[in-house]
Image: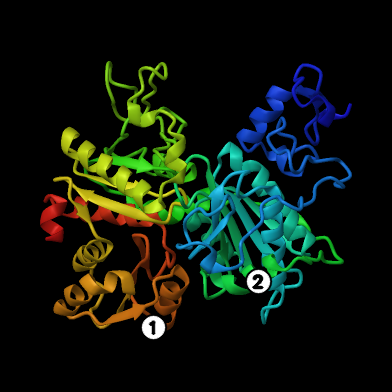
Amino acid sequence: MDARANLNRSVEVRFRCPGETYWIDRATHLARLAAGYAGCRSCVDRFETGGLLPATVRAADDTADRLAPDAGVVPTDPSACDSGDRFCGGEAIWGPEGLAGTAENQINVAVARRLAMALGTVLGQLPGAGSPVRVAVGGDGRWLSAPLVAAVSLGCQRAGCRVIETGNATAGSLAMVVRQGGLDGGILIGNALSATQTVSLKCFGPEARPWSAGGGLAPVRRALADEAVRTSRRFGGLERVDRTAEYRQGLGELFHGLRPLRFVLDAASRPLVEHLRQLVARSACEIISPGVPVGEAETDGGTVDAGRRPRAAGGQGSLGTRPNSVRERPKSLRTRPESLRARPESLRARHVDRLRTQVTRVKADFGVWIDGDGDALVLVDQRGRQIGPERLLWGMLGQTTVPASRPIVLARDVAASGKQLFAAAGWQVIEAEPTCEAVDDALRESGAAAAAGPGDRLWFAGQHPTSDALVSLGLILQLLSGQDRPISEMLD
């Protein structure tokens, strides 16, 4: 039966998952896609999402799965918009750390597939590239990311790369797979803008180096803009790995021996929340949610609930809150279409303001906001005061035995306030361009102990040389557990 001819007749359309002998209806098919069901990754009908993808309806012979002339055009001129990380003219926009935009309207499966082909082509041209080139692919676990994960995997295979699918991932966990597996690169289908209907594509090069504008992303961007994105003569292979346990085991020491702490968590990354739930399960820490429904996020990028504690009757509570109806939800949780047109920095400020109010209201020890990729973290102390990344890094290093002879890398957008702070404590400061790639390169080349980068990202040399919000949160918990003092006293 031709599923395309019955997009709205779920009773008549049937699907069969790879390796299974029974048929399922459309509702079960869509539910499995949303949950990241393992068989969906190799299913020929994984692009069949009930008419949500009008430009590229997936057919078994792949003849209809091509980029439409007017679908997902990517601007190549950075001057086409006044800011690289804002929306412009209904098209996907190149930001300093990758491609971002609204799902389907700005980034669809065709754009994701072509970006993956461009990345695979560029990685294959690097000195020392593997044969075949091996690329890790991970998604953030949302239903609208599932088709893009499949499209990216297909694009990398068409470029002749061997794809290693990691399942649900954060920037930190994907970088770990690339680094420890000796892979040539990786790509994360995430949510850097932390809004419900937006997606982002972040690229990593060899040794899990994040690629940014003006650096590793430049040739990828040129290849994507090239109209003739050619496939390789050899179709790449596909394998699936699950490094979840290994990733959590590497973070275990950071979440061991914690004293009872209460903190408010506003995180838009589902995989990160699940990792955190497992890591603190045996501790006495209490995680408080700003009161967002379980498994949902706000239209402008809200908390993904870890579902740890039931809701307190009649109001917002800790993790597990679910208002019974739209009418019961706070106004901030209702759909606001105009929020998708807001600037990313205004969306972050809105959530940080809400976080500050919540921390003081429930008298928590601190609060954190974490972006949808799981690599940026904003800290709010117990008084509701936002702490800058340079001061947070200064406080962390001040409580450790790291020698002051090792330099500290600061991005130029945070160096103005942080340079004097570290210099007064005897630290040598190295300034870097305000991109993740520049900060990461400076950290590796100088042998620095740590770094504060753009967008409230922190790097720590050693076992976790990647900007990972879960590592930063673990160090904050260790800092507070080591001394029975409020965090404001440690950072003042």
Residue 255: image x %, image y %? 33, 49
Q: Amino acid at mark 1?
A: Ser
Residue occupied by mark 1: 446
Task: Tell me if I can see residue 243 in this picture.
Answer: yes
Q: Which mark is residue 240?
A: none
Asked if one can make out residue 183 in the rendered structure from this viewpoint, the answer is: no
| Residue shown at the point (42%, 56%) measured from the top left | 375
Residue 169: give x, y in percent of width and height: 54, 50
Q: Is residue 52 left or right of residue 61?
A: left
Residue, x 22% and y 76% (percent of image)? Answer: 419
Q: Residues within 10 Å of mark 2 (few under 14, many from 20)?
A: few
| Left or right for 158, reference 479 | right
Q: Up-down: is 141 above or below 409? A: above
Foreground pick, 247 / 344: 344
Q: Secondary structure at mark 2?
A: helix
Question: Residue at left 38%, top 20%?
Answer: 323
- Image quadrant holding the N terminus, namely top right
**What residue is rendered at 60% in x and 52% in y?**
138
Q: Give the secondary structure at mark 1.
A: helix
> With 107 as the anchor, is 248 left or right in this view?
left
Indicate the position of residue 453 as horizontal and vertical percent values.
36, 67
- Mark 2 = which residue? 222
